[in-house]
Image: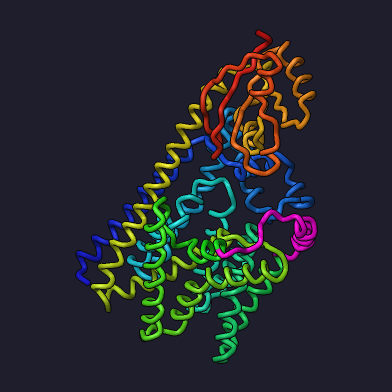
Amino acid sequence: MNKKVEKMVVSCLCVFSCIVLLCMIALCFNKSTWKDEVFVFKLIQNPYSYFLLTNRDAAPPLHFIIMKFVVDICKVLVPSVNSIIVGKLVAVVPFIILVIFSFAKISKYFGWMSAAVFSFLITTMPKMFRISIEVRMYSWVLLFATLCFFYFYVMINENSRKGVFKCTIFGALAAYTHYYACFVIAFFCIIYLLYFITIGKKDIVKKVSVVIIGSSLLFSPWLIIAGKQVIETAENFWIPKVSIADLIDIFTYGFVADVYEREVRYAVAIVFYILLIIFITFVIKDNMNMISKITIFTGILLPFAISFLGIAISLFLWPVFQARYIIPSLGCFWFAFSIVLSKIKDKHRVLFIGIIPFLMYVGYLNVNKNVKEELVYKENMEHFQEFFNTLDGSDILFTNNYRIEYCLPMYINNEIFCWRSEEMEDWEILLKRYLENGNVYYLDAPPESEHESTIINLPEKVQEMGYLIKDMGEFRLEYVQTEIYKIDNYG
């Protein structure tokens, strides 16, 4: 490829990656959250000992410890700081690190084209932008697993002791962030181990074995807590049985464009699958060294290996797998993808010139949709905040919706929230008591479950009881649309 054209492509991809990072950072100032994020904020109110000794969530502790540490430090330095903004900024940090790492390290070992493509893919491909602004563990496990995978290549290629140490540390950090990262690390360790045993490279076998043993030893103190989590959650785990729709979701998760049009979504996934077939064929026929081939094949196969393992466990033991659990492997996948693409540019220029615009188009679709969506959430939150600002300590809120009740404390302090009641007598007693001291508001939302659908229609009932109902308008909190009614004393 012409050097000027190559330099232009590299520059465009690098600049686009940096622009996307700025978009991620800007969107962190949206204070809208959803139920799983609120769960994290509630959990980090516990002391550190809770995460290390009595963690009842079905997840390892590292992400919660990182989040708690940063939020606590920020609260000490700036007491008025908003925890939601801090939490979202913490979620973006791994992507900033990955882009910088790409420019500093991947460029050194694989060239600037690989670095530019990877930095672009890791920030713009399906699901990547979304997890960068969610207060959850996925951005951090993506970082640790990807760094472990990269340094595995360095360790083997350079026969490096430093590589052994880095692989061991990043492998353990990944495992302490998400349980499926254990399978990701184990998969590529076993692949490399089997290959080097086969060809008799004893020195490399020793290093890979040290990484496996070292990571396992570092993770072993957590196994007792992990066992308790399994016992406590196995029978009542919230994940449903695997369905045909789940299988489609799992095997298209990292490749379906983040758009609403179904045809576009799956057309993009089909193109990605075609590209994978082309890439695998290219790698098989190419005369690159075997370490590079194994690295590429392992990275590309990782999401599928984790998917098959998760599905098998879900079918034969109990349901424990969802599509998003392949996220720990996606950094390794896009890393391998970027290596192949950079090698194709010299031998199949027409194909390369066709793939780059496709990737940029998909990246644009993903970023554009997520940015627009976040701006809508921000607008909805600001609208809801206007209502919150009219409340004082004597006002009371009722709701029929679990999500609303769960998320409200993130936005209103020093308020009393009453959860749903099945008995009308209870509502009547509560209304009489609270109307004497302040205003009463009812947040009415569509039912999300059979249980919620059986809850009484409060506005209708209180009108029958002689109360006045004033419709305050329609609002949206989390992903739930709700109608707010103000209940006044007898007319």
Q: Is residue 186 visible?
A: yes
Quick check: 328 above or below 302? above
Q: Is residue 43 left or right of residue 480?
A: right
**Count of numbered badges drawn on the protein:** 0
With respect to residue 387, does 214 lie above or below? below
Quadrant of image for the N terminus: bottom left
Image-quadrant location for residue 141:
bottom right
Q: Position of residue 454 (x, y in %)?
A: 70, 37
Please name whichever residue, 108 or 374, is drawn nearer the observer in this view of the structure.
374
Please say which color scheme the image uses: rainbow
Q: Is residue 126 above or below residue 40?
A: below
Residue at the (62%, 82%) spot, across then down:
206
Q: Position of residue 192 (x, y in %)?
A: 56, 80
Asked if the magenta segment contains residue 238, the reply would be: yes
Spot the residue most to the front: 464
**Is 20 displayed left or right of 302 in the figure?**
left
Q: Main secondary structure of the magenta part?
A: helix
The quarter of the rendered structure image containing the C terminus is top right
- Whether 323 is drawn above or below 348: the answer is above
Asked if residue 169 shows in the view, the reply is no
Name the spot of residue 304 as percent of width and height, x first.
53, 71
User: Residue shown at 37%/53% (left/top)?
Assistant: 17
Range of magenta residues: 219-244
Residue at x 75%, y 31% (from the top left corner): 421
Viewer-proximal residue, 323 or 223?
323
Q: Name the residue rendered at 43%, 53% in the picture.
A: 258
Question: Does 247 appear in magenta?
Answer: no
Q: Residue 3, located in which quarter of the rendered image?
A: bottom left
Spot occupied by residue 338 in the image (x, y as percentages of width and height): 39, 68
In which quadrant of the rendered view does residue 337 lie? bottom left
